[in-house]
Image: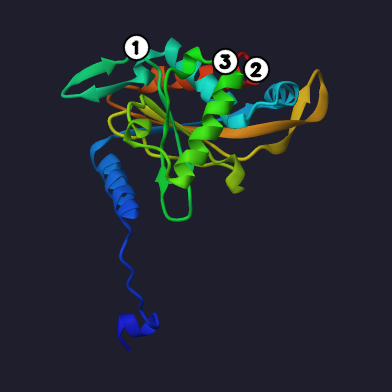
Amino acid sequence: MSAAGAKGEVVVEEPSPAERTVARRVAESRATVPELELTADVDVGRCLELLAERGSSLTAILVRACALSLGEHPRANGSYRDGQFELYSRVNVGIVVASEDTYLIPTVFDADRKPLEELSVEIEELVAGAREGRLTSPAFSGATFTLWDASTHGVASASIPAVPPQAAAIATGEIREVPALREGELTAAASITASLTCDHRILYGARATAFLGAVKARLEQAAI
């Protein structure tokens, strides 16, 4: 029996233009960027309290925490080009909007300069616009960093390739309840796993760890 016969009837599908773009970008990233991946578990209990108080969104909190940390760690807000480091003065966070067959990454410009409430409204509008096909090309340009909030997809952790030529990207999984020891007492804590993928040519070792640590600290302290 042939290999094809053993697998049953074969149906060949042509990728859509969007799927071809995704395939090209992922292949480019994996082939050209030497990646370093780090993960950290983050206690988001204080962030959940903040959500209840201010009616924001978890994605907005994540964007704000990443944006402020990018300002403190310029290498994470840059890129490696032609043997040189490019560091950017603006902090523009691309947010992944995923669907079944593709994803889009609209940009939140100057994310470090916007309060949480403004970010929440803007992100909601960007996500809706991306899904409905209402955004134009400028909305998908200029990102200096990428975030994928995969908390609604039911996975404990997620990862995303660094988007060339950006130095780094972070993906976060769903909020889950984990045991925690506080003041000698065993209790439950709300936790997420944050996964950092970075271009090892510009963000490596201590710098990558320090950046991820800064994001973790801001989220755990709700210092946003």
Q: Nearer the viewer, mark 3 or mark 2?
A: 3
Task: Give the amino acid at mark 3.
Answer: Pro
- Residue 29 percent across, percent down from the top left: 29, 40
Q: Earlier in the sequence, mark 3 or mark 2?
A: 3
Outermost residue, left side: 82
Q: Could you tell whether 189 is left or right of 210 in the image?
A: right
Distance of label 2 from label 1 (alpha carbons): 25 Å
- Residue 136 percent across, percent down from the top left: 36, 37
State which quarter of the image contains the N terminus: bottom left
Judging by the rendered image, the residue that carries numbered circle 3 is: 115
Viewer-side residue, 160 vs 11: 11
Q: For numbered disc 2, what is the local secondary structure?
A: loop
Label 1 neighbour load within 10 Å: few <14, some 14-19, many 20+: few
State which quarter of the image contains the C terminus: top right
Q: Are marks 3 and 2 in contact (CB under 8 Å)?
A: no
Residue 194 can be seen, yes or no: no
Label 3 neighbour load within 10 Å: few <14, some 14-19, many 20+: few
Q: For numbered disc 3, what is the local secondary structure?
A: loop
- Residue 103 percent across, percent down from the top left: 42, 46
Q: Residue at x 44, y 10 (%)?
A: 72
Q: Quadrant of residue 48?
A: top right
Judging by the rendered image, the residue that carries numbered circle 2 is: 222
Judging by the rendered image, the residue that carries numbered circle 1 is: 89
Distance of label 1 from label 3 (alpha carbons): 18 Å
- Residue 186 percent across, percent down from the top left: 81, 29
